[in-house]
Image (cartoon, rainbow, N blue to C red):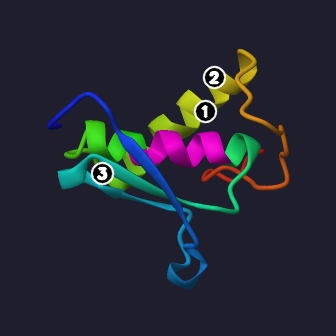
Amino acid sequence: MKNSKIKVKYSKLGRENIWGVAHCGNNLIELDTRLKGKKHLEILAHESLHILLPNLSEEEIVRLSVVLTKTLWSEGYRKIDNSTDMHLQDGSK
């Protein structure tokens, strides 16, 4: 990682059929503009982990991002809304 800050950009990613993408060489994450609440936290954690731990498999990134999301959410992390209408990557709310 070149520097200690990961930049976040919001884009419409529906055409690509993805919620987010990590550009590891630039420390940049693109997140879909439709993300809210717990799902936003999960995808932010997921893409951040891709940048921080680029050698991990996708399955391991999913597992870690779900654990991190559940931990932070249970500790009261909220951005703006706490919508749970979008499931986490493991199918749970």
**Quadrant in which the C terminus is drawn:** top right
- What amino acid type should be assigned to the residue bearing mark 2? Leu
* Dominant secondary structure (helix, strand or loop) of the stretch shown in magenta: helix
Name the residue furthest bottom. 15
- Could you say where residue 48 lies in the image, as x and y percent from the top left? 39, 41
Residue found at the very far left of the displayed protein: 2
The tag on residue 69 is 1
Residue lying at the far top of the rendered structure: 75
Q: Quadrant of the N terminus?
A: top left
Q: Earlier in the sequence, mark 3 or mark 1?
A: 3
Residue 15 placement: quadrant: bottom right
2 or 3: tag closer to the N-terminus? 3
Q: Amino acid at mark 1?
A: Thr
Count neighbours of disc 1 (C-alpha within 10 A) and say few if under 14, some if 14 to 19, many if 20 or more: many
Residue drawn at point x = 68 percent, y = 48 percent: 39
Queried whether the magenta region covers residue 65, the answer comes back as no
Please indicate whether residue 36 sits to the left or right of residue 20 in the image.
right
For disc 3, the marked residue is 57
Mark 2, residue position: 72
Q: Residues within 10 Å of mark 2 (few under 14, many from 20)?
A: some
Highlighted range, magenta: 40-47
User: Which image quarter: residue 58?
Assistant: bottom left
- Per the model, the C-alpha gap separating discs 3 and 1 is 18 Å
In-front residue for pair 36/88: 36
Going by the numbered disc 3, the residue's amino acid type is: Ser
